[in-house]
Image (cartoon, helix red, strand yellow):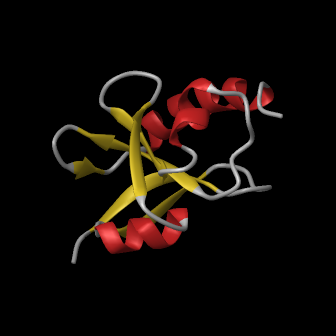
């Protein structure tokens, strides 16, 4: 099984780049349930999150309860490199300031 690098966001922790198995069951374990794939920042970046958190992460201002991660997705999941992760992390910091 292959691995991909993602920007992981866990409750009460700073976002960090981690490698995870490129496997849907692994993704569901990380987000604590069924998956949702939401647009983020700009194409091809996507938020992979629990289906119950998707709308709030994209459009709302509520702090997420579960872990989620950001990855490139253009028909298939792809690694995010360090430069992209820094760019996405900067955007995410601004978004997180609005979460309650």
Picture quarter with the N terminus: bottom left
Residue name at image x 55 percent, y 67 percent:
32
Q: Position of residue 80 (x, y in %)?
A: 37, 45
- Most extreme residue toward the right is 100
- Most extreme residue toward the front is 52
- Most extreme residue toward the left is 75
Q: Give the vertical position of 97 relative to 48 (above or below).
A: above
Of residue 96 and residue 54, the one placed in the foreground of this image is 54
Q: Position of residue 99 (x, y in %)?
A: 77, 32
Write down the quadrant of residue 43 in the picture. top left
Picture quarter with the C terminus: top right
Residue name at image x 20 percent, y 37 percent:
74
Count of numbered marks:
0
In the picture, measured across the screen, residue 84 lies left or right of residue 58, that is left
Q: Position of residue 8 (x, y in %)?
A: 55, 54
Q: Position of residue 26 (x, y in %)?
A: 39, 73
Of residue 63 and residue 69, the one placed in the foreground of this image is 63
Residue name at image x 55 percent, y 50 percent:
52
Of residue 35 and residue 97, the one placed in the foreground of this image is 35
In the picture, measured across the screen, residue 9 lies left or right of residue 98, that is left
In the picture, measured across the screen, residue 13 lies left or right of residue 31, that is right
In the picture, measured across the screen, residue 65 lies left or right of residue 73, that is right
């Amino acid at each position: 099984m292959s691995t991909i690098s993602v920007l992981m966001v866990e409750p009460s922790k700073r976002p960090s780049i981690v490698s995870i198995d490129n496997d849907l069951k692994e993704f569901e374990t990380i987000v604590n349930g069924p998956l949702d794939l939401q647009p983020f920042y700009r194409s091809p970046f996507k938020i992979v999150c629990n289906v119950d958190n998707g709308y709030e992460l994209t459009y709302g201002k509520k702090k997420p309860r579960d872990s989620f991660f950001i990855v490139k997705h253009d028909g298939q999941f792809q690694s995010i490199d360090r430069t992209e992760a820094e760019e996405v992390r900067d955007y995410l910091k601004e978004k997180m300031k609005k979460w309650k």
